[in-house]
């Protein structure tokens, strides 16, 4: 498992972990993360990231923020 990463949405901090950080490369279009005990699969759609399996609307907002954080950190 990768290191714990953190994002802030509004005034709430969220932590997540990339399940397989070695698989994150510039051509990556699907990333699996562990967030709040759940495994979420993020899929790149155009220039944004969405959940493959939608849990709820809040999760979609979190998925987009996680995708942006990963894209900035790993330059994808």
Image: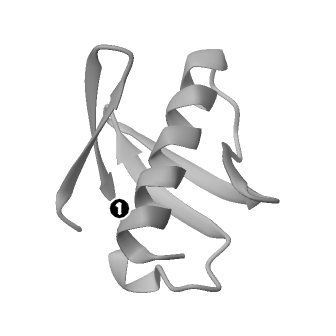
Q: Position of residue 70 (x, y in %)?
A: 43, 61
Q: Classify residue 2 as left or right of residue 53.
A: left
The residue lying furthest to the right in this view is 46
Label 1, residues with CA under 10 Å away: few <14, some 14-19, many ≥20? many
Q: Which type of secondary structure does the marked residue at label 1 adopt?
A: strand
60 to 45, vertically: above or below? above
Residue closest to the far left: 3
Residue 20 visible = no
Q: Is residue 70 above or below residue 76?
A: above
Residue 14 can be seen, yes or no: yes
Q: Residue at x 64, y 18 (%)?
A: 56
Q: Considering the image in quadrants, where does the N terminus appear?
A: bottom left
Asked which quadrant contains residue 51, the reply is top right
Left or right: where 38 falls relative to 13: right
40 and 26: which one is in front? 26
Residue denoted by label 1: 18
Relative side of 27 to 37, left or right: right
Residue 4 screen position, x and y as percent: 18, 53
- The one of 68 and 39 positioned closer to us in this rendering: 68
- Which residue is painted at 49% across and 65% down in the image? 71
Residue drawn at 40 percent across, 75 percent down = 74
């Amino acid at each position: 498992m990768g290191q714990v990463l953190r994002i802030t949405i509004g005034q709430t901090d969220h932590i997540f972990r990339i399940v397989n950080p070695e698989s994150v490369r510039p051509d990556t279009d699907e990333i699996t993360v562990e967030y709040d005990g759940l495994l979420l699969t993020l899929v790149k759609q155009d220039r944004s990231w969405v959940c493959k399996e939608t849990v709820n609307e809040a999760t979609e907002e979190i998925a987009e923020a996680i995708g942006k954080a990963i894209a900035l950190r790993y330059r994808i």
